[in-house]
Image: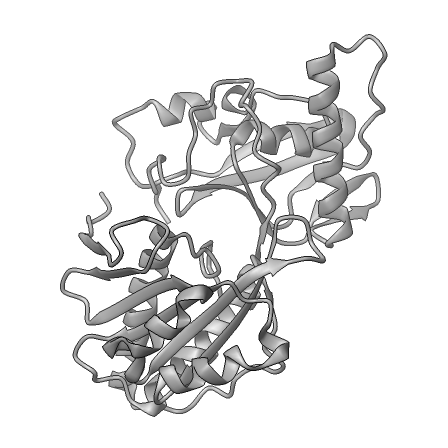
Amino acid sequence: MPQGKQVKMFLVDGTSSGLVTAQITNWTGHVMKGLRRDLARIRKRPEATRTGVYILLGPDLEVADGTLAYIGQADEIAKRLGQHDRDEDKNFFQDVVVITSKDENLTSAHVRYLEARLIAIAKAQSRARLTNGNDATQVSLPEGDVSDMEYFIEQLRMLLPVLGVNLFRGRAAENAAAAKCQAVPTKNEHGDGWQSGSVREDSPVFHLRLKKWHVDASAQVVDGEFTVLQGSSARKDMPDASDAMAMSTSNQHRLRRAHRRRLFDDGTLQVDGDAARFTRDCVFSSPSIAAAVVVGRASSNGRIEWKDDKGRTYGEWESDDTNESPET
């Protein structure tokens, strides 16, 4: 069973939309998140005077529901944030995340290492478009320090999604890219009741196969998200909507078709002979939406259509309290 973590959050302004600090018990890291409008206050806080890493976040106007991000480091974060606030190239950012250490033991070399690793992970996950001009040069650290910094990153990747920052979330970041593939939120017609983080992390690999349309897709719950895995094949074309479709079905068809088009446009799906191939891991907001996109339908019941190697449906696995972690 996964070991639990205690996260301590403090709403500085007493509201969820204001300045927030967060930390994990028995971890030296400290995270602060706030809006750009509060930048003057952020820069005056003790955390911002420390050596650390920071993330600037804002909407990507070139991609539907996309995110722009910049990852940086500084010996004094407050000073660097002031420079970015005056930089026209950084006009995009609306949110600021400041990452430091409670014991102030992060050195310049440590944060340069963290910056380089976080940029690499963010690029691998492909959940946001980075505005960093070049990859940061990863510095050489003593073996013990590398171990400490990798543990720091592990805890950070666990904490940031709690604050709604998902840049580094996903499977095997060094070896696989995860695309942000969620559709526009709609009512779940199959009652999945599926939400990020609500599914155990011991997910087996599920499969959806239809020889008629050359579909052979694999998926797994990764860090609480239903993820279609790189290399999966999907239906190449989605048929036109039928005049006989009910209005609700026709609307679902339109949404799924638009969703598939976005995946082709950003390169997540590419035509490969008689099928379409996923070029990277792709996160979906539910197994049913994933199934519908893979099979090219207006709707699908992903709780039934995705099955593991034992023949269990996703729904059966999800409701089985006796599950154990799969062997590796």
Give the camera-side residue of 225 and 218.
225
Q: Quadrant of residue 186?
A: top right
Q: How is the image coloured?
A: one colour
Q: Is residue 175 visible?
A: no
Counting from the top left corner in percent of width and height, residue 137 is at 51, 88
**Farthest left residue?**
26
Counting from the top left corner in percent of width and height, residue 289 is at 59, 30
What residue is rendered at 34% in x and 80% in y? 52
Counting from the top left corner in percent of width and height, residue 93 is at 54, 66
What residue is rendered at 58% in x and 81% in y? 87
Q: Quadrant of residue 203?
A: top left
What residue is rendered at 24% in x and 70% in y? 29
Image position of 237 with respect to 268: above or below = above
Q: Is residue 102 visible?
A: yes
Image position of 189 with respect to 65: above or below = above
Task: Give the mark count.
Answer: 0
Image position of 171 with respect to 69: above or below = above
81 sits to left or right of 237: left
Which quarter of the figure is the N terminus placed in?
top left
Counting from the top left corner in percent of width and height, residue 258 is at 74, 37
273 sits to left or right of 65: right
